[in-house]
Image (tube, rainbow, N blue to C red):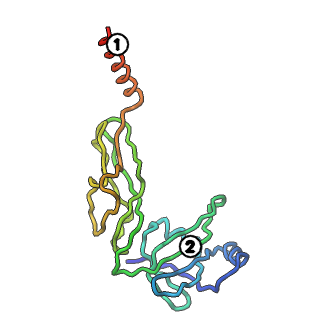
């Protein structure tokens, strides 16, 4: 079931008018979709932050616009003021619930390797799914891995109705030896070479 979020329809505003909106706790935004005319709106900043934190950026929302429209939407983008941390604009995309779309989903590693240092070069995955089938995140079990072990996209179990779009050979996790172990191994190799030369 989608989460409801109230919105107010707005005319296209100037920068100064948008600033006044933000000062009053409203975030300017736009709703658009295929074969639909874009609608300029505003939403309550506190409620918007609650939804983002509780539902994630790939949640399907029921946007209740005071003009009488009620539409299913997805977040397309939201902009944050880097200095103040405030939301300054949000874009919603009208979702066709029957059509699969391509989105980015967070990747999280669970567990600790038996030994060594766990490296995670990839933190997001591209997936294709219908809006209601988009996973909030994808988790990968890294427990039990040993030095030299690697997990690639092809090793990720897909437990849901979605498709991974990344290259199957892309590395998502690997386990490296600690620096001191690498140094010891290098020292042993040098000693062995010196012995051979003698």
Q: Position of residue 78 (x, y in %)?
A: 55, 69
Relative placement, left or right, of 41 versus 71 is right
Quadrant housing residue 45 = bottom right
Give the residue drawn at x 28%, y 69%.
Answer: 161
Quarter holding the N terminus? bottom left
Nearer to us in this view, 182 or 66: 182
Q: How many marks?
A: 2
Nearer to us in this view, 31 or 45: 31
Find numbered disc 1 in the image and state the secondary structure of the residue it sits on: helix
Give the residue drawn at x 30%, y 68%.
Answer: 162
Give the residue drawn at x 31%, y 11%.
Answer: 195
Q: Disc 1 marks which residue?
A: 194
**Which residue, as the protein is rendered here, is positioned at the far right?**
16
Nearer to us in this view, 120 or 194: 194
Image height check: is 31 above or below 46? below
2 and 1 marks in contact (CB < 8 Å): no
Relative placement, left or right, of 166 versus 21 is left
Quadrant housing residue 197 = top left
Name the disc covering residue 161, or none: none
Q: Disc 2 marks which residue?
A: 90
Relative placement, left or right, of 156 versus 52 is left
Which mark is first along the chain, 1 or 2?
2
Find numbered disc 2 in the image and state the secondary structure of the residue it sits on: strand
**Which residue, as the protein is rendered here, is positioned at the far bottom?**
68
Q: Position of residue 154 (x, y in %)?
A: 27, 55
Relative placement, left or right, of 85 versus 180 is right
Q: CA distance from mark 2 to mark 1?
A: 65 Å
Image height check: is 90 above or below 38? above
Quadrant housing residue 130 = bottom left
Dot in front, 2 or 1:
1
């Amino acid at each position: 079931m989608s989460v409801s979020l109230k919105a107010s329809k707005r005319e296209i505003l100037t920068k100064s008018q948008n600033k006044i909106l933000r000062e009053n706790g409203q975030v300017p935004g736009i709703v658009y979709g295929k074969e639909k005319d874009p609608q300029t709106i505003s939403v309550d900043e506190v409620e918007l932050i609650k939804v983002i934190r509780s539902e994630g950026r790939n949640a399907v929302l029921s946007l209740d616009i005071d003009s009488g429209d009620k539409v299913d939407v997805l977040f397309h983008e939201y902009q944050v003021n880097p200095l103040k941390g405030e939301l300054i604009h949000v874009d919603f995309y009208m979702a066709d619930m029957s059509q699969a779309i391509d989105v980015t989903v967070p990747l999280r590693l669970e567990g600790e390797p038996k030994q060594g240092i766990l490296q995670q070069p990839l933190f997001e995955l591209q997936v294709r799914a219908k809006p209601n089938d988009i996973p909030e995140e994808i988790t990968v079990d890294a427990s039990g891995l040993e030095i030299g072990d690697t997990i690639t996209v092809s090793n990720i179990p897909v437990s849901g109705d979605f498709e991974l779009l990344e290259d199957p050979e892309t590395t998502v996790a690997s386990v490296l030896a600690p620096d001191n172990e690498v140094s010891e191994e290098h020292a042993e190799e040098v000693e062995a070479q010196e012995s051979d030369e003698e």
